[in-house]
Amino acid sequence: MAEKEFKCSQCDLPEGRCACEKYCCLCQNMEGVRLVGDGLYYCTDCREACDYKTQEEIA
């Protein structure tokens, strides 16, 4: 069974096609942000602190 593709909660597109402004929804950092399963973007530090995984990290 294939994993569900992560999509931006704002535009409903995958990270590679998303044209939304990308910033961490917790700290507003704009560096190293990635989309996670809840459809929001998080920076590396916040992803690690919250134990969130990117699409590639769960595959």
Image (spheres, helix red, strand yellow):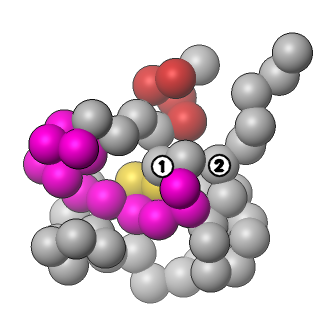
Indicate the position of residue 25 as horizontal and vertical percent values. 31, 73
Does residue 46 appear to the left or right of 38 in the view shown?
left
The answer to whether one can see residue 16 in this image is no
Q: Which mark is residue 57?
A: none
**Which quadrant would residue 59 be assigned to in this image?**
top right
Picture residue at 40% right of the left edge, 63% below the top: 41
Q: Does residue 41 belong to the magenta stretch?
A: yes
Q: Label 2 sits on what residue type?
A: Phe
Seen in the picture, residue 3 relative to 37 is either above or below; the reply is above
Picture residue at 44% right of the left edge, 84% below the top: 21
**Which quadrant would residue 42 be assigned to in this image?**
bottom left
Q: Residues within 10 Å of mark 2 (few under 14, many from 20)?
A: some
Q: Label 1 sits on what residue type?
A: Val
Question: Magenta residues, as a range?
Answer: 38-50
Does residue 20 appear to the left or right of 7 in the view shown?
left
Figure quadrant of the N terminus: top right
Seen in the picture, residue 14 relative to 6 is either above or below; the reply is below
Indicate the position of residue 20 as horizontal and vertical percent values. 54, 82
Indicate the position of residue 43 as horizontal and vertical percent values. 24, 57
The answer to whether one can see residue 56 in this image is yes
Q: What residue did someone put label 2 on?
A: 6
Q: What residue did someone put label 1 on?
A: 36
Picture residue at 52% right of the left edge, 23% below the top: 58
CA–CA distance in space, label 1 to label 2: 6 Å
Q: Secondary structure at mark 1?
A: loop
